[in-house]
Amino acid sequence: MTLAEQIKSRFPNLVLEAVENRGDQVIVIKKEGIKNIAATLKNDPVFGFNMLMDLAAVDYLHWEEKAFRFEVIYNLFSLLKNQRLFIKALVKETEPEIDSVAAVWPAADWYEREVWDMFGIRFKGHPNLKRILMYEEFKGHPLKKDYPYNKRQPLVGPVN
Amino acid sequence: MGKITAPPYRNDREAIGSQKANRSGGGVTAPPPPDASPNLEKFNFMTTSLNEAIGWARKFSIFQYPFVTACCGMEYMATACSHYDVDRFGAGFPRFSPRQSDVLFVVGTISHKMGPVLKKVFEQMCEPKWVVAFGVCTCTGGFYDNYATVMGIDTIIPVDVYIPGCPPRPENVMDGLMKLQAKIQAQKQEI
């Protein structure tokens, strides 16, 4: 049984899919389960995913086959077992919100701020959810696919 | 205890006068009177216009403020180090305070978030001041055309010399530096 399948058998209601893609273990989950799964993956010595390598999001705006617009992707690494895992949490366009995992991995703090800044996905329970890259005066979230690619919001100087 | 005496006062005019006297042929002519005008050719003076002289002084004392934001900074460091010796152009002394510097070197991509900072640094510099756009990102925005990047710093502050290149080679930078020197020399010097 692969690692992804192990996790699926542990959380049968929360994990939608467990696949192995070119040697990478991937689980696709409901966003309601992220806090529970994250805490288990970190604290249970069977998994020992004590390191959050990356946290990003993808906007599937024009993908017909995707029922959910956003995926928040967690890239985990276990220093104990030397293995990696990708978690994809599905987020709807109408409800761009997911639980924060900053309490589980403190490294998630700035990653979640970046995802909020670029994609406008709110993280419930985040200690300081504000923009990290763009300036406070910036309107909108520039990496969303419906942000106009030629829209400029300069602080000084002309709109070029 | 011996008496301390001051050394005899030596007047340069007198000295020059007496040298002239000594050289001018063994006591045939009388030494000039002490209030005669000194022989000015001994002072090696030259005449020029004030404008030219100030321009010459300013073009060889380029105190630069390196406003380094991106990868061009490495090339700037390579140029500023001893291998290329920008001190030949009087530009070997970077000041890290805008109030002490003459030339603002904007080195690297300027984002819209950075724009107000750049403008404030420029406004803090004392006149006379010049701006060099170092690298293609500062000249035009370069290959960036997105929500984050300023499309050329001349939309924010006036620019005197553009040094394109991604990054510019040190030879290119020195070419720009010499063009800046020529510009400083040729302009009307505000005092």
Image: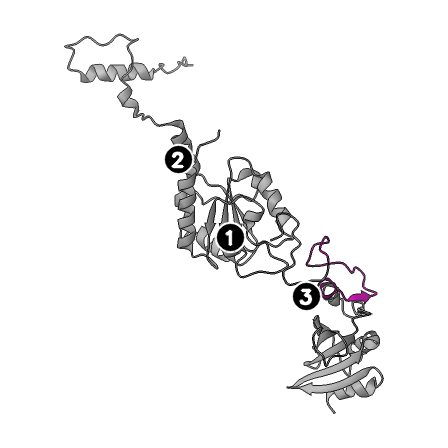
Q: Indicate the position of residue A158 as horizontal and vertical percent values.
A: 61, 49
**What residue is drawn where x is 72% and y is 74%?**
A73
Q: Amino acid at mark 2?
A: Trp
Task: Name the foreground residue: B170 vs B95.
Answer: B170
Segment colored magenta? A114-139
User: Dividing the picture into quarters, in which one does residue B182 lie?
Assistant: top left
Residue bearing mark 3: A143
In this rendering, is residue A151 above or below A20? above
On whether disc 3 and disc 1 are found on a single subunit, the reply is no
Classify the position of the N terminus of chain B by image quarter: top left
In this rendering, is residue B73 above or below A87? above
Q: Which of the two marks, 2 or 3, is nearer to us in this view?
A: 3
Q: How far separated are the C-alphas under marks 3 and 1?
A: 26 Å
Residue bearing mark 2: B56
**What residue is drawn where x is 43% and y is 38%?**
B184
Circle 3: element type: loop
Query: Please, what is the dominant secondary structure of the magenta stretch?
Result: loop
Task: Name the foreground residue: B151 vs B102.
Answer: B151
| Residue A113 shown left or right of residue B148 in the figure | right
Residue bearing mark 1: B139
Q: Amino acid at mark 1?
A: Cys
Q: Indicate the position of residue A2 as horizontal and vertical percent values.
A: 73, 89
User: Dividing the picture into quarters, in which one does residue B90 lie?
Assistant: top left
